[in-house]
Structure formats: structure tokens, C-alpha cells
């Protein structure tokens, strides 16, 4: 009898606790749903992925003087340009206007965007068109018969 009365008396309190816990849990889940993607977007990959720098390497004799080689770097298209026997450049191949992939024109020694006509020189500097800023440069060097690309 006593137990039934106590249960009856505690029911409103239990309901409040339950509803409060459910609301707190829902608010926590909603906050995690908002902040986790935001944090993943804002933090550079190297910080969220353990701080390891990405590198790319290709044999020097696979890229002839004056040619460009496209590759994937940091999960995005990039290119190496072998300017001379001893000079190489690595750049993002993503146009800074609206994100199309640039093409390399060997004779003109420049990258051109097929979407809206932006033009870049071999260092990534804007030569014309709507591109608001240069192509992103990466660190590139010749080492032991290879071209090695790293994050700048
Ligand atoms: S996306 Fe390259 S010029 Fe517009």
C-alpha cells in the first residue's frame, strides 16, 4: 500500500526527469550534428587527420621539360610543370573562379580554364579572365631522380 502511494506520488517527478533528460539528449545530439561538420570543415586536414603532411612523388624522367603532369593531391586535381631540366613547379589545378579544372597549354606555357577563360602563368599567377586569385602553389623539388611535391 505504501509502495503504491509512493509510486503515485513520484510519478510527476519521474516524468519531469524523463522529459528533461530527453530534451537534454536531443539538444546535445542537435549540437553535435551542427558543430562536428563545422569543425571538420574549419580545421585543416593535417590537424584533424593527425598532422601528417601529404607528399607525392614521380620519377623525373616521366615528366619531360616543358610538359605538365596532372595528379591528385590532397584529394584534389593538381599539376606539376617541369619548366627546365632542374626547375619544377606544382600547383592546384582547381580554377580559383568557380572550381573548374584548368588545362595546360604547352606552347603558350600557361594554364587556361575551359569554363570562363581564366588564364594563369606557370607560377599560377592570374594572366586574365575572371579568376580572383592565383592557383594554390605546392612545394616541389627534384630529389634523387624524383620530383617530390609537398604542402607549401
Ligand atoms: S571556373 Fe575557371 S574561369 Fe570560371
Image (cartoon, grey):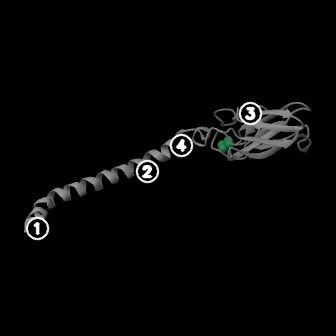
Left or right position of 25 against 110: left
Which element carries disc 1, helix, strand or loop?
helix
Q: Alpha carbon of mark 2 to alpha carbon of mark 3: how far?
A: 38 Å
Q: Alpha carbon of mark 4 to alpha carbon of mark 2: how far?
A: 13 Å
Q: In terms of sequence position, does the residue under pointer 1 or pointer 3 come before the other?
A: 1
Which of the numbered marks, if any, corresponds to residue 124?
A: 3
Which residue is depicted at the point 24% across and 57% down? 18
> Residue furthest toward the front?
2
User: Where does the image place residue 46, in percent across and percent down from the top left?
Assistant: 62, 39
Q: In terms of sequence position, does the residue under pointer 4 or pointer 2 come before the other?
A: 2
Which residue is depicted at the point 69% across and 36% down? 129
Q: Which residue is mark 2?
A: 33
Which element carries disc 4, helix, strand or loop?
helix
Circle count: 4
Quarter of the figure with the C terminus: top right
Q: Quadrant of residue 83?
A: top right
Q: In terms of sequence position, does the residue under pointer 2 or pointer 3 come before the other?
A: 2
Between 27 and 69, the one nearer to me in the picture: 27
Q: Nearer the viewer, mark 1 or mark 3?
A: 1
Q: In terms of sequence position, does the residue under pointer 3 or pointer 4 come before the other?
A: 4
Quarter of the figure with the N terminus: bottom left
Q: Nearer the viewer, mark 2 or mark 3?
A: 2
Q: Quadrant of ligand 1?
A: top right
Q: In terms of sequence position, does the residue under pointer 1 or pointer 4 come before the other?
A: 1
Q: Nearer the viewer, mark 1 or mark 4?
A: 1
User: Where does the image place residue 13, in percent across and percent down from the top left?
Assistant: 16, 56
State if disc 4 and disc 3 touch (CB < 8 Å). no
Q: Nearer the viewer, mark 2 or mark 1?
A: 1
Which of the numbered marks, if any, corresponds to residue 4?
A: 1
Q: Nearer the viewer, mark 3 or mark 4?
A: 4
Q: Which residue is mark 4?
A: 41
Which element carries disc 2, helix, strand or loop?
helix
Amino acid at each position: 500500500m505504501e509502495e503504491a502511494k509512493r509510486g503515485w506520488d513520484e510519478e510527476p517527478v519521474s516524468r519531469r526527469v524523463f522529459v528533461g533528460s530527453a530534451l537534454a539528449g536531443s539538444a546535445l545530439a542537435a549540437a553535435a550534428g551542427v558543430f562536428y561538420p563545422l569543425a571538420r570543415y574549419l580545421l585543416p586536414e593535417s590537424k584533424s587527420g593527425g598532422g601528417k603532411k601529404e607528399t607525392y612523388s614521380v620519377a623525373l624522367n616521366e615528366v619531360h621539360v616543358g610538359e605538365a603532369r596532372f595528379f591528385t593531391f590532397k584529394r584534389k586535381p593538381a599539376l606539376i610543370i617541369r619548366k627546365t631540366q632542374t626547375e619544377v613547379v606544382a600547383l592546384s589545378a582547381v580554377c580559383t573562379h568557380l572550381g573548374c579544372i584548368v588545362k595546360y597549354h604547352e606552347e603558350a606555357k600557361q594554364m587556361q580554364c575551359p569554363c570562363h577563360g581564366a588564364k594563369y602563368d606557370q607560377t599560377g599567377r592570374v594572366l586574365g579572365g575572371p579568376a580572383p586569385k592565383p592557383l594554390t602553389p605546392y612545394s616541389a623539388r627534384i630529389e634523387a631522380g624524383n620530383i617530390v611535391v609537398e604542402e607549401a
